[in-house]
Image (cartoon, rainbow, N blue to C red):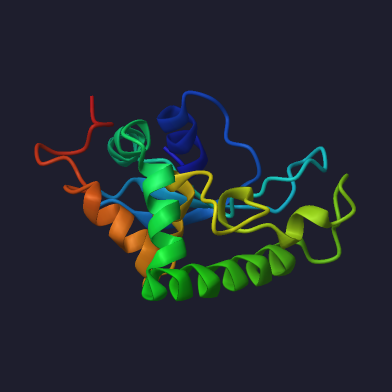
Amino acid sequence: MDDRAVVERQLGRPPRAFLRVVRRCPFGLPAVTEQAAYDDEGEPFPTSYYLTCRHLVAAVSRIEAAGGVERWSERARTDPELAASLGGATAEQRALRRALAGADTGRDGGRSLELGIGGSSTPTNLKCLHAHAAFALARPGYVLGERILAEAEPLWPSQGCCMRD
């Protein structure tokens, strides 16, 4: 089975703006994908790295449901190390999106190319912890994302891949 087919099965729908797998789980399946800045219709896809592993998606969803977006946003605003990490990752995200887009400016005329991780127009107000976790897995060294992932431990199912039938 090719990566796109596996990602479709993981998501339960065809992936939008899919480019490639950038991180695999220990079982060899896609865990994080890289997305184009614009989909085939020219609509912005502001999440450069997308978490596809069902186990990780569920773990991060639990963090979000427990108020994690607000908690981590506050920590990113008040902890100098996390603030610096978010600032650096935001700059890296913007450069990555511009590089992925090339000359394409999509239906929004390129405005979305300047958004932060997960499409945030105000990077210190986190929108989606899944996007920050995916960014950390794709780009090791992103301290804020790595701390979010630490809260999601264990990252991988202990009994084997949850996608295996």
Which residue sits at x=43%, y=44%? 70
Answer with the quarter of the image where residue 159 lies: top left
Q: How many marks?
A: 0
Answer with the quarter of the image where residue 91 lies: bottom right
Question: x, y percentage for residue 48?
Answer: 58, 55
Question: x, y percentage for residue 56?
Answer: 31, 41
Among all residues in the image, which is located at the extreme front?
78
Left or right: 71, with 44 as reference point: left
Say if 76 sits above or below 4 in the image. below
Which residue sits at x=40%, y=75%? 80
Q: Quadrant of the C terminus?
A: top left
Question: x, y percentage for residue 8?
Answer: 49, 31
Answer with the quarter of the image where residue 13 lies: top right
Question: x, y percentage for residue 14?
Answer: 57, 29
Q: Is residue 161 visible?
A: yes
Which residue sits at x=43%, y=62%? 76
Q: Nearer the viewer, residue 60 or 38?
A: 60
Say if 103 sits above or below 41 in the image. below
Q: Quadrant of the N terminus?
A: top left
Left or right: 28, with 113 as reference point: left
Which residue sits at x=53%, y=45%? 127
Q: Is residue 138 visible?
A: no
Q: Nearer the viewer, residue 16 or 143?
A: 143
